[in-house]
Amino acid sequence: MKTENKLENRIHTVQEACEALMALEVNPGTERIPVEEACKRILAEDVTAQIAVPSFEKSAFDGYAVRREDIEEASPENRITLKVLETIAAGSVGRYSVTPGTASRIMTGAAIPDGADAVVKYEETEFSETEVTFSQPAKAPNIVAIGEDVKKGTCLSKQGKVISAADIAMMAGQGMEQVTVYKKPEIAVISTGSELLTPGQELVKGKIYNTNPYLLSGYMVANGMKPQKYGIVKDDIDALKSCVEEALAQSDMVITTGGVSVGDFDYIPRVMEQIGARILFHRLAFKPGGAMLAAVKDGKVILGLSGNPGAAVVGMLRVGWPYMKKLCGMSEFCFAEAEAFLKDPYMRKSPGTRILRGKAQIIEGKLFFQLIDNQRNGAVSSMADCNLLAEIPAGSSELQAGTKVKVYFI
Amino acid sequence: MKTENKLENRIHTVQEACEALMALEVNPGTERIPVEEACKRILAEDVTAQIAVPSFEKSAFDGYAVRREDIEEASPENRITLKVLETIAAGSVGRYSVTPGTASRIMTGAAIPDGADAVVKYEETEFSETEVTFSQPAKAPNIVAIGEDVKKGTCLSKQGKVISAADIAMMAGQGMEQVTVYKKPEIAVISTGSELLTPGQELVKGKIYNTNPYLLSGYMVANGMKPQKYGIVKDDIDALKSCVEEALAQSDMVITTGGVSVGDFDYIPRVMEQIGARILFHRLAFKPGGAMLAAVKDGKVILGLSGNPGAAVVGMLRVGWPYMKKLCGMSEFCFAEAEAFLKDPYMRKSPGTRILRGKAQIIEGKLFFQLIDNQRNGAVSSMADCNLLAEIPAGSSELQAGTKVKVYFI
């Protein structure tokens, strides 16, 4: 009954597996949506400034628009008084040009009137309704130049970028109402295992509540993917096969949990064979989560993860994540890799590559990796508050506190 | 016409302003929602484990459940063969007790049968349908203990926590279908200024497209708040007053941009007076964004921010944010403060507190603050890719690269 692994198993390491997935073509669809709904979506076009911001010279302060030369000689001993032409409010345009001997009262953001080349702040003048007096020259132009914030033709945001609040504001500043973004990939999540119950069902001995789809979907939703829950499939090869086929037809990618190992009821590899999916890899050399599989059918990936929540999520995040972000249309696929210092000693040897779950801490400007207590494969609680994975290379011995390790932000 | 500042101005620093806001009572409402929709919401109850996970002893591997003493003497020279009673699949419970001389084939996750106290992996045995042979003792129990992931009575997640994917999975693991979370606070956003246009309107000289509500709302949405856009109010005191009153009645908090300085059309302070709001502070000693105001009416805060996008967002994030997170029900109000090293020199003196916009970079385990080029108040582009604010204390002179500065993650 034991399923033979028929693979040549050329792909063995995390790196090779990531690369094999990343080598696959993706073709995410696009959609036009209102700019204000675009936060965290992935930009599917370059956004280039069609207008300069500001598109006219404007005042940086409330004050008086003057000709600098008129007050160049001003001093406490030589006070210079100019006639006030008008008040220019923000949003309106002055009626008069500033000519020798005159000034216009101007509000922050208002267009500089013709003739003026500086704005003197209120505080630096004395004024009445009709006149303004200076006892010093203009200190600075106090004029916001055309294009000071955004020059016409500038690329504001690049295709493939995660749209931020500032990106949206820049698009609004261009008068844009809609933007083209990539559609969120629909990712089917199938749980396999006769031991699984759905919350709401009565708990009986031998059964456990299913947690994997909640865990995996949570990460997907937070990263702009659209998980589609296909529920629980019992350990029955035909039921599993038809569920996978249905999910493949309806989604951009399929993720299964459980059934990927070598047990009597680990049907995922056999289902891949039966549906004619090409296996990219099966079993990788890392823990936890290395008991995983990836296959391709009709250009769509099936990622078979461990049934253990801790292992499943590490497998998805460490191996599947770059590809899944590519599927979202992101141009920077890999999640942020950095180096951190171990906060505490890690007193186990790591014959194979080992991925640890932990928390980022910044202490006096240094990034520390604080190991989370419970590193067991099955432990959902090991992911609570986890925001950093550390990768310990194969062949490492015990590690002292302060050792520098490669980490991934999740 | 100049608005006199009638305040005694006791509150002057960022710290004092944050504390004055944080001293206000908040009373966020709660709602019951499906667990699977709770990601990023704020927990309004302690979640305590009602059941241990797992709730029964289960096998950590596919293998044979045995009595350890039966194979204690096993060696290559002294192979011990046991009779196989049955196969126990995950999710089912064995029919037989393991008695001396017997074993049960067992799958990962299946309940350990009575009598057995260890599981030996397939790989460490030789087996047929009816018998299994051992040439070594059991190396480890390979039994997942009751409560190994979650002990009954453990507090899984505390009130006030941002619910993560793992929190949701832990709740699902408890069989929970619904959870009590805080309602998202509704925050009215009012833009003031006769110069403002809504995207879609034709651009004319003296006018600019309104960006502030897009920028501020983006941060709010990303942090679990519900911005309510009240559009643009021209510089008209009555229109502004009635808009603020309507927004106060309909929202949990009101944010305005523009009109908060000392210009002829800076009506916000006067509106506060007219509606009888108590002013907490007006004008703070930091740049950019210090030209801001907070007032309270009927227990609700009105935060009047600068009309300059860069200044508005710094004011909201540095001063308003802790209070706004409290309004969300979060128990950890303050945004993450840390220390970082300046990536480049900062060659300006800072007579007053100065807040710089930048990016976090981690290089060889150290957190660096990389200044964003455009620090102008009006510059929306200064917030693109900004994920870190650095706070330079008043009285600082030029700063060399590598100087340690206080930073806030945003």
Image (spheres, coloured by chain):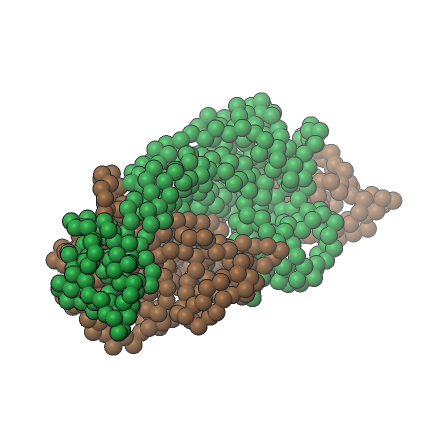
Chain colours: A brown, B green
Q: Nearer the viewer, residue A124 or B223?
A: B223
Q: Residue at x 74, y 45 (%)?
A: A101
Extreme residue in the right direction: A77
Residue A382 higher or lower than B195, as above or below: below
Image quadrant in which you'd find residue A376: bottom left
Q: Number of numbered discs present?
A: 0
> From where the camera sits, is residue A316 visible?
no
Left or right relative to B36: residue B410: right
Q: Position of residue B363 (x, y in %)?
A: 56, 65
Q: Nearer the viewer, residue B376 or A14?
A: A14
Q: Residue at x 70, y 43 (%)?
A: A121
> From where the camera sits, is residue A378 visible?
yes
Left or right relative to B364: residue A301: left
Image quadrant in which you'd find residue A16: bottom left
Location of the N terminus of chain B (image quadrant): top right
Q: Position of residue B124 (x, y in %)?
A: 27, 68
Left or right relative to B186: residue A92: right
Q: Position of residue A220 (x, y in %)?
A: 34, 53
Q: Residue at x 19, y 62 (%)?
A: B82
Residue A220 higher or lower than A198, as above or below: below
Residue B217 higher or lower than A343, as above or below: above
Q: Residue at x 45, y 30 (%)?
A: B28
Q: Position of residue A202 (x, y in %)?
A: 22, 38
Left or right relative to A335: residue B363: right
